Structures are given as C-alpha cells and as structure tokens.
Image (cartoon, grey):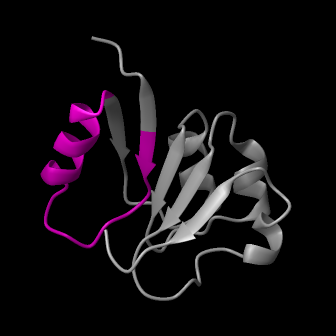
Amino acid sequence: MTAQFKIALTDYQTPDVEIEKRIVATAGGELLVEQCRTEDEVIPLAQDANGILNGYAQITARVINALEKCRVIVCCGVGVNSGSFEEWKHLTLICRKSKSL
C-alpha cells in the first residue's frame, strides 16, 4: 500500500523508533528515519516529506528552501538550537516546539 504522506525523522536519542513508525503507519503514512546532523544529510531525507520531526539536526533556510512538500516542522526536545525561527517565520509552514518526541 502506498503511503498517504511521509514524515522525516531527522535524528533521535531513543534505542529505536518502532513506536513512532507504528503511529505514523496507522495514520496512513511512512516514517523516514536517519541520524542527520548537517544540512547535506537532512535535505535528501526530507526533500519530499510532508512533515519533519527534528531533534538536533540543523534546519536552516537552505534546508527549508529545498523542501518540496513540507507543511510542518516539529522540534522535539528542550530548546530550539536546531534552526532559526527568524528564518522560518516568513514561510507558510507550521513550526512547533514540543517537550519530547
């Protein structure tokens, strides 16, 4: 079955992401998972994703400009040092910070 949407998980600190994969799959989507740290790693992972779950990978203007379908970016964890809300605020994206993934 073809996924209705794709979510890119740029990086994570847990032993695995099986729970996240099941949640996204149950909703009809596909979770794309990598351990990215740089723009050059994030772009190919997230380029055609509908949303991004991000921990520490850098989500810069360069990354955002390369995104083709993304409509939401969620920064998981404490603090927001993985991107610039100043760079993000002019976009038609929903950018949210969560306390944990």
Name the residue at 21% across, 33% down: 26
Residue situated furthest top in the rendering: 1
Q: Is residue 1 left or right of residue 59?
A: left
Q: Quadrant location of residue 91?
A: bottom right
Residue situated furthest bottom in the rendering: 79
Against 86, is 91 above or below?
above
Image quadrant in which the C terminus is located? bottom left
Observer-nearest of 38 and 99: 99
Name the residue at 55% across, 44% down: 46
Observer-nearest of 101 and 60: 101
Q: Which residues are magenta?
A: 7-28
Q: Quadrant location of residue 82?
A: bottom right
Against 14, is 5 above or below?
above
In percent of width and height, residue 36 lies at: 46, 60
Q: Is residue 76 left or right of residue 81?
A: left
In percent of width and height, residue 77 lies at: 39, 80
The count of marks equals: 0
Q: Is residue 23 left or right of residue 50?
A: left
Against 79, is 97 above or below?
above
